[in-house]
Structures are given as structure tokens and as C-alpha cells.
Amino acid sequence: MNAQLQTITQLQTEPIQPQLNIPRWNLALRIAFRFSMVYLGLYCLATQLITAPTGADIPDLATVWPLRPIISWIGAHIFHVNASLSFGGGSGSYDDTFGWVTAFCLLMIATVATVVWSRLDRHRENYAGLHKWFRLFVRFVLAGQMIIYGISKVIPVQMPYPSLTRLLQPLGTLSPMGVLWASMGSAPAYEIFTGFAEVAGGLLLIVPRTATLGALISLAAMVQVDTLNMTYDVPVKLFAFHLILLSCFLLAPDVPRLVRVALSTQAQLFRSVRANRIAFAAQMIFGLWLVGVSCHYSLGVWNTRGGGRPLPPLYGIWEVKQMSIDEQLRLPLLTDSTRWRRAIFDYPDRMAFQRLDDTFAAYGASVNLPERTLALTKSDDKNWRASFTFQRPAGDQLILDGRMDNHQVHMELQLTDRNSFLLVSRGFHWIQEAPLGRW
């Protein structure tokens, strides 16, 4: 009797623990979680996503046994590439062969693991507890990368101010990545701003209550970064894409709530339903009108001064190989301001000569192709005229003869191959074995 009373007293004094009613996850959600956990977990463990934030010289797991022999074998026997020798130093850090084969191997391992896991654990209702801990892991992995890369921009060392050598380097000799690095480095205030955004995303990820906001900021920042990587051919496309995946994993449970907030009902302008419908239609029409006007203007500019403009008959960059004035040969001396270095024909109605000191003299230009004549004018002197006849002995050769500033001028020019400029010819590369290379 005393034992029963004691038990009743304990039940009355002990707090009642609430029972959480966690709904059953549907099959697709359970499979998606299994795959996401295995693949993202392996990728984080196998690459610098885990090792970089420690600051220690710890090799990525993909570079040691047992993953490295597997990656090398897959590269050699399936893709017929030497993934072992082409490793660039940091699996997944760069878009080299080793990084891509690593991602493929982890994808295959995750697929097989998901199938086996789904078979053995098919009666599980949900993974709420496991998701909670894996979400914590992903938060800190992503936060580490956001803070590391953010600080390297807040203290602008990732894209430093252009060096003296870079300041003297012609734009055309830069790669697209070189242009991006130079432009970002030359605007340190903007680089610092983007760094603060990345640091803010990382810090918010660390705090549980602000993790969703941190994931949103991280997603926006990484979408921008990966877009720059793709369009400027920066060799960290694969790495940045996985940071996007980590951000999406963190945001996935909150997507319905975020959609509801984005589509929340706004205050009605009028009391009448009919008036509100008319107002809605007017707003849509106004939006379409803005799009139409903007497209019309931009297409007009594109077709007259942009990439869709007609090209002049003498289009190109022409090197002045030989030039004479009043039958006197003019050597390419830096002290001679009347000796041209190049002639540039880029637009139908104008051209420019480049002097030996790399300054330019711009002229209005009119080419009469049937008569093979070239007429030049100056915008600041309506009475100034120069006229030339031209010959094209070959497609890449041009001879100009005429009068300019009351002098008889003769020029022999050679067409420069546009693809000789790295900025033009670099192109896009999914795989880059030399991460920094020539840029």
C-alpha cells in the first residue's frame, strides 16, 4: 500500500513530457532524405568543405585510401582519364578531372547506399531525429565556407587590387577570369560588400533561430558566385554548386512557409470586387508595357550599336606594317605622333587610328565598297575631310592611299586574328586541369 502511494506521489510531482506528433513522411521524402544525407555527407567529408575551416593541413578524404584508389580506377576504366595524376590539390576545390570523377564516384555510392538503406529501413515512418542532427552538421559546414570566403573579401585578399604588371597588361590578353579578378579587385568597396553578405549568411547559420535567414542569404550569395564562375569560366563551378545544394537542403523544410509568405494576401485597394479585378488587370498591363518598352529600346540598341549591329566592310584590327607620308617612309618611332600603329574598323559609321603611344584618334567613316573608297571626318571640325582608296590583295591585307591633313598618305596593313586575344578565344571549360593557369 505504501509503495502504491509513493508511486502515485511521484507521478503527481514529476513533469509530464509532451509527446511530439511527428507525421509520417511520404516515400519520396524518405528516399530524398536518404540520398541527400549520404551524398552531401560524403561530399563534405571527402572534400575541403570539412578540412578548410579547421585551418590544419589535413588531406581531404578523397585523396587518401580507400577513396583515392576507387576514384583512380573509375577514372581509368570508365572515363579513360588519369584522375590520379591530374589531381590539382584539393578535391572538389577545382574543376579538374579528379574533382569531377570524385563527384561521380560519390554520386554512385550515394545511389547504391540509398537503394540498400531504403530496402532495409522501409518501415521507418520518418527521420525527424536524424534530420535534426544532420541539419546541424550541414549548417556548420556551410557556415564555415561562407565565413572563410567572406572574410577573404572583407579583407580583400581573394581578389586583390590589380598589380602594376596587371595595370600595364592589355585587356585582350586577359582571360575572362582575369577580367573578373581585375574588375572586382579594382572596386574593393564592392568586394568588401559582397564579403559582408557572405559573412552575415555564415554567422546567421550558426544561430538556430536565424538559420533559415542565413541559408537564404547563403543561397543568394552562392547563386551569384556560381553564375560568375560559369560566365567567367572560373574553375570552382563544381564546388560553388555544392554550396548551393547545401543551402537548398537547409531551406527545403521551410519552402512551404516561405511560399505562403511570398504569396500572402495584400490589402485590397477598393471595397468592390469588380474594382479590385480591374485594378489587378491594370497592374498586369502596366507590367507588360514596361517589359515591352524596355525590350523595344534594348533591341534597337543591340541592332545598331550592340552585338547585332551590321559590321563594316573593313571590320577588324589592322596592324600598320608600313606607312609613308609624302613618299617618305615613316618608321614606327614612339616620338612620331603622325605614324599610326593600328587602324580599327568596328562600327559602320566610324573608325579609329591607334598611335604608337597607344592613344587613339577617332574619326567618322564612310566606306564605299563598289568604288573602294574610304572617307573620314571629324566630329569637332565639320570642314575637315580625308579620303582614301583601298585595295584588298588578300583577305588579311589592306592597302590605303589618299590625302589626310594636306599630306599624301600610303599605308600597308595586316589583319589581326581576333581569336589571338585570350579574352576572345578562352571559351568555357567544364574541366580545367590547371586551376590558376594563364588568366
Image (spheres, rainbow, N blue to C red):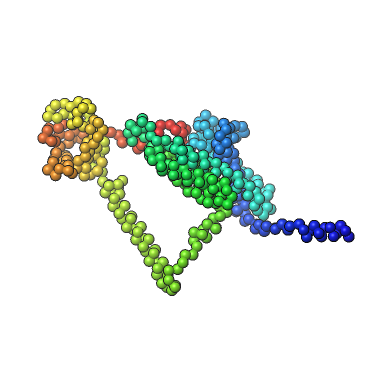
State the residue lying farthest toward the right: 1
Q: Residue furthest left?
A: 406
Quarter of the figure that contains the C terminus: top left
Where does residue 407 sit, x and y in percent of width and height? 12, 33
Q: Position of residue 145 (x, y in %)?
A: 53, 41
Give the camera-side residue of 136 and 40: 136
Residue 401: name its quadrant.
top left
**Which residue does the image show at 37% across and 64% down from the upper left?**
285
Residue drawn at (57%, 31%), measured in percent from left and top? 57
Task: Return the residue nearer the eye: 275 or 316.
Answer: 275
The quadrant of the picture occupied by the N terminus is bottom right
**Measured from the top left, where is residue 275 in percent x and y?**
41, 72
**Left or right: residue 132 compared with residue 202:** right
Identify the residue shown where x is 26% and y is 38%: 316
Q: How many marks?
A: 0
Relative side of 246 to 381, left or right = right
Query: Where is 397 relative to 38, above or below?
Result: above
* Residue 352, picture quadrant: top left
Q: Is residue 437 visible?
A: yes
The location of residue 187, given as percent across then percent down, is 38, 40
Left or right: where does residue 273 sit relative to residue 135? Answer: left
Is 278 rendered above or below residue 390?
A: below
Any part of residue 369 in sight? no
- Name the residue located 55 percent from the left edge and 58 percent from the top edge: 257
